[in-house]
Amino acid sequence: MAHRAMKTAQGQNGVQFPPEADGDFEVVKREEILAWREKLNERFGIGQGKLKSLDVVPAR
């Protein structure tokens, strides 16, 4: 409980992070992000017309 109170006191500057974000993170290079994005696009067909809309929009 004291840990949670301490976290709340630290978050008084307006920015609060969830508990899972409490750790040391390294800076990710732009090239790595672009590589991840390319792999995800290929895997899920983003930009290739493979995605289907889940919401049916009524015709006007």
Image (cartoon, grey):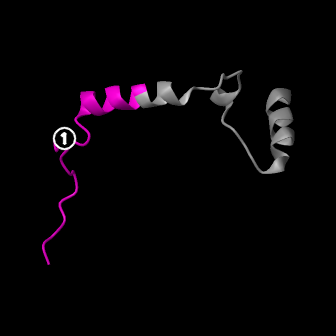
Q: Say whether residue 6 is left or right of residue 48.
A: right
Magenta highlight range? 35-60
Count of numbered marks: 1
The residue at the point 43 percent across, 31 percent down is 34
The residue at the point 66 percent across, 22 percent down is 26
Residue 41, picture quadrant: top left
Q: Position of residue 31 (x, y in %)?
A: 49, 27
Note whether 22 is above or below 48 in the view shown: above
Note whether 9 is above or below 44 in the view shown: below
- Magenta: predominant secondary structure element? loop
Q: Say whether residue 12 is left or right of residue 42.
A: right
Q: Furthest residue to the left?
A: 59
Q: Nearer the viewer, residue 21 or 25?
A: 25
Q: Position of residue 53 (x, y in %)?
A: 20, 51
Quick check: is 49 in the magenta stretch?
Answer: yes
Q: Say whether residue 27 is left or right of residue 9.
A: left
Q: Furthest residue to the bottom?
A: 60
Q: Quadrant of the N terminus?
A: top right
Which residue in the protein does label 1 denote? 48
The residue type indicated by label 1 comes to Gln
Residue 59, picture quadrant: bottom left
Q: Position of residue 32 (x, y in %)?
A: 48, 24
The residue at the point 39 percent across, 32 percent down is 37
Q: Secondary structure at mark 1?
A: loop
Q: Quadrant of the C terminus?
A: bottom left
Q: Position of residue 47 (x, y in %)?
A: 24, 43
The residue at the point 86 percent across, 29 percent down is 2
Q: Residues within 10 Å of mark 1 (few under 14, many from 20)?
A: few
